[in-house]
Amino acid sequence: MDLLQMLDTKGLPEKYRSMPTEELEERVRSIKNKLGRKLFIPGHHYQKDEVIQFADATGDSLKLAQLSAENREAEHIVFCGVHFMAETADILTMKNQKVYLPDMRAGCSMADMADIYQTERAWAKLTELFGESILPLTYVNSTAAIKSFVGEHGGATVTSSNAEKMVQWAFEQKERLLFLPDQHLGRNTAYNIGIPLEDMAVWNPLANELEYSGPLEKVKVILWKGHCSVHENFTVENIAHVREAYPGMKIIVHPECRREVVALSDMAGSTNYIIDAISVSPPGSSWAIGTEMNLVKRIIQQHPDKQIISLNPHMCPCLTMNRIDLHHLVWCLEELEQGKEHNLIEVDSVIAENARKALNRMLEQS
């Protein structure tokens, strides 16, 4: 058992904590065989190998939610990801399908940086400053309540794959946009479509104020002051080290990284973009990857013919994502097997309705 498991076992019955790995794995296999098509286990790219080995599908959060919705035979969806991902799956699935999260403490620090109260307070102040000229967009890495707010106000969700397309769509609707909750994805995306950095302001939800020193009429993009705690830890110093230590190595990063890191990298794109770019690269090519460590390690294992390292060798895996482990998965499945709705994810119907509007506006552009 690693340090995270030892520190983070609140609520987990002792029998699961002390159960040998072989027995835990056998119990998952047994329940999967027993429930058959009634059970669907989606696993996010950032999950541990001990969990991902049992996933019926792997991918990013939206893809997994969509696959859950398409799988009409599945009555029970045990989502191996974080809370907002399970919420999205619940929003998109049928009423007869139930979504569960193996550990309810598996959250997302980025999603938690924009709560609905802060957002409503910010919207009131921003509309005082800019009138009705703003359209809200939210990264899918946000709570159901934020997606609902955006949907109610005519906006849409975005993914790291379609962010440029959705930002362009937003500017067809309104003069300005508010981008929640990740400032780095918003900044990188807006910059890529030609918005100057000096036309971007930052909304500080803790101070409840706009951080901008120029004339307000110049503001085109308002970036929520949030970030991914994993991707923000890749630095220009990391890039400088790779350039010196590994001449010729390509650096590829996720657009949740800081603007200066993306600017100095060779390539930047979504998780699937990173996976695909390395998959089609020739044998012997060398890569430094700026994204979550569990995924980087998996890519290294899958491509022994290539030299692959993490852009930051001291990077830890996503700690909240890692709360989903084999112990919690078995506990959830055994409770489910006994007819108990353990860690059921249920989004309020009104919130779900407006959140679907935001998601559907994005899907209509796809």
Image (cartoon, grey):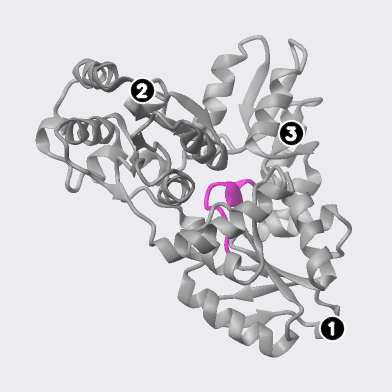
Q: Pointer 2: residues within 10 angstroms few (<14), some, or many (20+)?
A: some
The residue under the point 61% across, 11% down is 304
Residue 37, which numbered label? 2
Magenta stretch: dominant secondary structure: loop
Q: How far apart are marks 2 and 1 (CA)?
A: 56 Å
Q: Distance between the residues labelled 3 and 2?
A: 41 Å
> Which label sits in the foreground, 2 or 1?
2
Residue 15, which numbered label? none
Residue 232 colored in magenta in the image: yes
Residue 208 colored in magenta in the image: no
Q: Earlier in the sequence, mark 2 or mark 1?
A: 2
Q: Where residue 219 sits: x, y (%)?
A: 80, 76
- Residue 302: name its quadrant: top right
- Disc 2 residue type? Arg
Residue 251, which numbered label? 3
- Quarter in which the C terminus is drawn: top right
Q: Where residue 127 sits: x, y (%)?
A: 67, 85
Q: Where residue 113 sits: x, y (%)?
A: 50, 64
Count numbered badges in the picture: 3
Q: Give the magenta range.
A: 226-235
Q: Name the residue under label 1.
A: 217
Q: Do the residues labelled 1 and 3 touch (CB within 8 Å)?
A: no
Q: From what the image shows, is residue 67 above or below residue 89?
A: above
